[in-house]
Image (cartoon, helix red, strand yellow):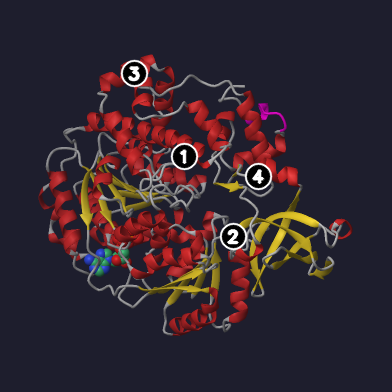
């Protein structure tokens, strides 16, 4: 089978599982092979019972010292007994496996592998697998892939499909030039893909990962260098100067710009007046006021008779920006439009027409803005709210909607300057390095779950004083695989616990966009007091009246993500609070959380996080969603990023064309990456 073949060509995948794989974004054999494990289940040696810790999957060996006991709890049949080795004893339990009752024998030796959880203050092992000594020896040290899943698709099914695909696929020729592989000591693509799914050891995994990270960065860098060459000092068809920058624009704001905002605004004005195309990144910590700078630039474009558009990662955010822009800019006679995927066909068509006829000056929207059907009359400025979601290609597609429009990119990712220069190699950088003066620093605390009652009382008090609260849970609904808090059950029990006058709602990514918009709008209008949500609210939501953020199972998030989440409070003048609630209060968890508890500075948090994890720790929690890389992590893999950039920079555009002639695979990969035939 070829990488481009449908996954249906893999034995065992029928119509039903095909649909499930679609949900994971997999429709071809190649996509399946590039669907990497989220983590690995490592078969570690047998551990003394005394040393097991909560949350770990461990193997213990001992004999049962109590008879198996069966209990009915809700609809579950729970079988439990005590197992003992020379160091201690622990309870083990199985649910819905009553047949074990007969086979488990007291006094016999067993090897069990399962997760240790804390129930009623006691450690216990749940749902362990019983291993024979032979199975144990065979699997010891093995790393079994654990894939991201969707309901109905098991890890076993994905593993089986990947195994079959690895066996049956006709591999394409190696696409990285031999000289690069040699210089940077990289293994072959084929070997790396095989290993990333089934590594024999950590060492092998690290070597495979290095190759895949490098290629990801290399393609990115080649595309970026090419873009830079193409754009370099291009004259602009839309110079914006003169009285469009008059004070009326700044007077619409109810506050004065901070020094950082003023500087960024001056740099933008200078760019747009220069007669050349602006390509600028505005980098600033969460809540530093980047949106307002983008709004000013868009307003200046509109006032000079052109169109501008701003693309953001979520519908909720688009709606929020739209409303804010309307409130500020409509009084100046500027016409704002909204375009998102969930609008009806009729609404969309109307907006396309208005955009083509230049009846809107500023269009706010999601990916919908770059769909083929959208034609702009006179697109002179595009703004992307980076939030790590859009890649170079999206920026380019957006750009093609106009005739070399000016470009502004906003980012809240705290990237060290040296890396920013590489990652945003095609852009000039403005940094907003101060927060608005009316802000009080957020007060943080990292606590264990025993603090919850106090936290609830505190929330009640804040709500009584007219403020609002966010509570974040990692899961949407109950799952067999984890004890992490989920939005649905959490909301129910919170409603039971809080006085009925407190209005509680929930939000998660599985709701329809219209429902999400409605809930966010109600929260913004203060018709909801406490919003229980997954991380969907992470990106850019701005409700300055929200003063408390509580993050359940904070140990499950990367620090960068926790910082983004925390950024949803502390956006107004009232004192705000962030409570990081650790589901397991192990020493390592608390040490990590102490970093974020001790500082509100995103750069500091990112730096300390890296120090703690160490560049070699590739198994730690991945900082979620950084920039646009699948496997690579810009902090951990900063070295590979530098190397790949150096390698890409060593080829001029002409050399790249030559290389692509020689390496057919490279041409294809680059085309896939940039979505364009150009070589
Ligand atoms: N100079 C200022 N003085 C006071 N308030 C300001 C100032 N600039 C912006 N704000 C307010 O601060 C809040 C956050 O601003 P904004 O949404 O622009 O931040 P951001 O940098 O885009 O945040 P994020 O990265 O989280 O999306 C908004 O309510 C905005 O009105």
First in sequence: mark 4 or mark 2? 4
Q: Which residues are magenta?
A: 7-12
Q: Quadrant of residue 78?
A: bottom right
How far apart marks 2 and 1 lie (CA) works out to: 32 Å
First in sequence: mark 3 or mark 1? 1
Q: Residues within 10 Å of mark 4 (few under 14, many from 20)?
A: some
The disc placed on residue 659 is 3
The disc placed on residue 155 is 4
Q: Quadrant of residue 183?
A: top left
The disc placed on residue 476 is 2
Residue farthest along the left direction in this orientation: 242
Reading the image, the residue beneath label 1 is 206
The one of 325 and 463 positioned closer to us in this rendering: 463
- Callout in the foreground (2, 3): 3
- Callout in the foreground (3, 1): 1
Ligand 1 sits in which quadrant?
Answer: bottom left
């Amino acid at each position: 089978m070829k990488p481009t073949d449908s996954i249906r060509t893999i034995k065992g995948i029928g119509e039903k599982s095909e649909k499930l794989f679609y949900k994971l974004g997999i429709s071809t054999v190649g996509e399946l092979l590039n669907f990497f494990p989220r983590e690995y289940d490592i078969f570690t040696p047998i551990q003394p019972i005394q040393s097991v810790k909560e949350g770990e999957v461990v193997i213990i060996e001992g004999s049962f010292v109590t008879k198996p006991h069966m209990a009915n709890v809700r609809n579950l049949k729970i079988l439990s007994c005590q197992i003992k080795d020379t160091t201690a004893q622990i309870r083990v339990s199985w649910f819905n496996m009553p047949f074990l009752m007969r086979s488990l024998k007291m006094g016999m030796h067993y090897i069990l592998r399962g997760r240790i959880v804390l129930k009623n203050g006691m450690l216990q092992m749940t749902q362990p697998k019983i291993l024979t000594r032979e199975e144990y020896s065979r699997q010891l040290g093995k790393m079994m892939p654990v894939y991201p899943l969707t309901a109905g698709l098991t890890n076993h099914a994905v593993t089986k499909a990947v195994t079959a695909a690895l066996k049956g696929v006709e591999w394409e020729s190696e696409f990285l030039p031999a000289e690069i592989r040699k210089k940077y000591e990289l293994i072959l693509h084929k070997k790396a893909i095989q290993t990333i799914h089934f590594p024999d050891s950590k060492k092998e995994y690290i070597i495979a990962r290095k190759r895949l990270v490098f290629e990801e960065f290399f393609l990115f860098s080649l595309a970026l260098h090419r873009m830079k060459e193409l754009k370099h000092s291009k004259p602009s068809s839309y110079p914006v100067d003169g009285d469009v920058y008059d004070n009326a624009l700044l007077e619409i704001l109810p506050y004065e710009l901070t020094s950082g905002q003023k500087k960024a605004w001056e740099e933008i004005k200078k760019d747009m007046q220069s007669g050349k195309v602006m390509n600028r990144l505005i980098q600033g910590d969460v809540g530093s006021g980047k949106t307002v700078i983008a709004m000013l630039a868009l307003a200046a474009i509109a006032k000079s008779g052109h169109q501008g558009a701003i693309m953001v990662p979520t519908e909720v955010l688009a709606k929020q920006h739209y409303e804010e822009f309307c409130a500020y800019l409509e009084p100046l006679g500027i016409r704002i439009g909204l375009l998102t995927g969930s609008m009806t066909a009729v609404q969309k068509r109307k907006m396309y027409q208005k955009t083509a006829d230049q009846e809107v000056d500023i269009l706010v929207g999601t990916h919908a803005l770059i769909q083929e059907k959208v034609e702009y009359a006179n697109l002179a400025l595009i703004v992307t709210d980076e939030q790590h979601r859009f890649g170079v290609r999206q920026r380019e597609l957006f750009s093609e909607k106009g005739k070399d429009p000016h470009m502004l990119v906003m980012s809240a990712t705290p990237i060290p300057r040296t890396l920013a220069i590489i990652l945003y190699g095609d852009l000039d950088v403005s940094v907003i390095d101060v927060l608005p003066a009316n802000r009080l620093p957020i007060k943080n605390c990292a606590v264990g779950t025993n603090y919850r009652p106090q936290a609830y009382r505190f929330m009640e008090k804040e709500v009584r004083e007219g403020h609002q609260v966010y509570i974040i849970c990692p899961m949407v609904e109950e799952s067999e695989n984890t004890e992490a808090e989920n939005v649905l059950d959490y909301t129910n029990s919170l409603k039971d616990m809080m006085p009925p006058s407190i209005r509680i709602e929930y939000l998660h990514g599985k709701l329809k966009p219209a429902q999400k918009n409605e809930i966010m709008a109600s929260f913004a209008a203060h018709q909801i007091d406490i919003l229980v949500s997954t991380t969907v609210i992470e990106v850019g939501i701005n409700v300055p009246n929200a003063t408390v953020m509580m993050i359940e199972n904070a140990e499950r998030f990367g620090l960068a993500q926790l910082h983004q989440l925390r950024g949803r409070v502390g956006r107004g003048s009232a004192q705000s609070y962030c409570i990081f609630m650790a589901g397991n209060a192990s020493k390592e968890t608390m040490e990590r959380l102490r970093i974020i508890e001790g500082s509100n500075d995103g750069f500091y948090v990112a730096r300390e996080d890296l120090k703690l994890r160490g560049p070699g720790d590739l198994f730690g929690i991945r900082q979620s969603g950084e920039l646009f890389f699948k496997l690579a992590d810009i902090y951990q893999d900063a070295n590979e990023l530098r190397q790949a950039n150096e390698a890409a920079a060593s080829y001029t555009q002409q050399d790249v064309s030559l290389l692509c002639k020689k390496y057919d695979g490279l041409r294809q990969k680059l085309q896939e990456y940039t979505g364009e035939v150009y070589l």
